[in-house]
Amino acid sequence: MENLIKTFYTALKNCDGATMASCYHNDVIFEDPAFGVLKGERAKAMWLMLCNSQNGSDFNVEFSNIKSAKDSGSAHWEAHYTFSQTGRKVHNKIDAKFEFKDGLIIKHTDEFDLHKWAKQALGIKGIFFGGMQFFKNKLQSQTNHLLDKFIQSKKLSN
């Protein structure tokens, strides 16, 4: 399963959302501080959306410390990019945990310090509000709204 994790992060590094989505089981459950819990097609669509929005940007990913056992695995990855809403540079450090089923990722949990991310991405607002639950709730609401719009646009173009 180590190769599956490497494929997943190599695809992220290359902004290849389709390959990332193909690493996910149809019943996948993804969770992180920015989106909350996403299941199935919504989890796959999130990577398609994020990769689509990063094309042509300064987005860069490094991954390391990949470990896997029969049914589980983990990795560390770091993303460097400019947050489009503020133009501020972000260096996010993420620890990922995976569970596997049928040779694919069935559960993926990304953990990172949301307050630290908010300070980098939003500046003074992030310093004051980034560690608060209402900020996390608002961010998840906004990211899921963007995801809904992305999914709807893909349905309309098909």
Image (cartoon, grey):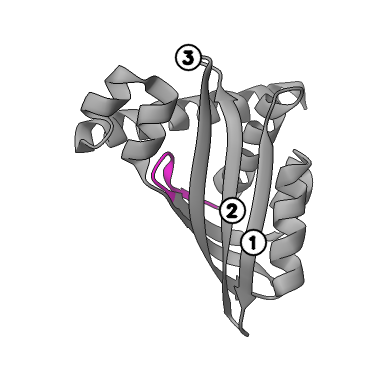
Dot 1 surroundings within 10 Å: few (below 14), some, or many (20 or more)? few
Q: Is residue 80 above or below residue 53?
A: below
Which numbered marker is on residue 13?
A: none
Disc 3 residue type (three-letter):
Thr
Give yes or no for contact between labels 1 and 3 (Cβ–Cβ under 8 Å): no
Q: Is residue 36 left or right of residue 54?
A: left
For this rendering, which residue is in front, 143 or 97?
97
Tag of residue 77: 2
Position in image of residue 150 (x %, y %):
60, 26
Residue located 45% across and 52% down the image: 31
Q: Residues within 10 Å of mark 2 (few under 14, many from 20)?
A: some
CB contact under 8 Å: marks 2 and 3: no
At 55% from the left and 18% from the top, the residue drawn is: 84
Quadrant assignment for the C terminus: top right
Determine whether 34 is above or below 4 in the image. above
Residue numbers of the magenta segment: 32-39
Sequence-first disc among 1 and 3? 1
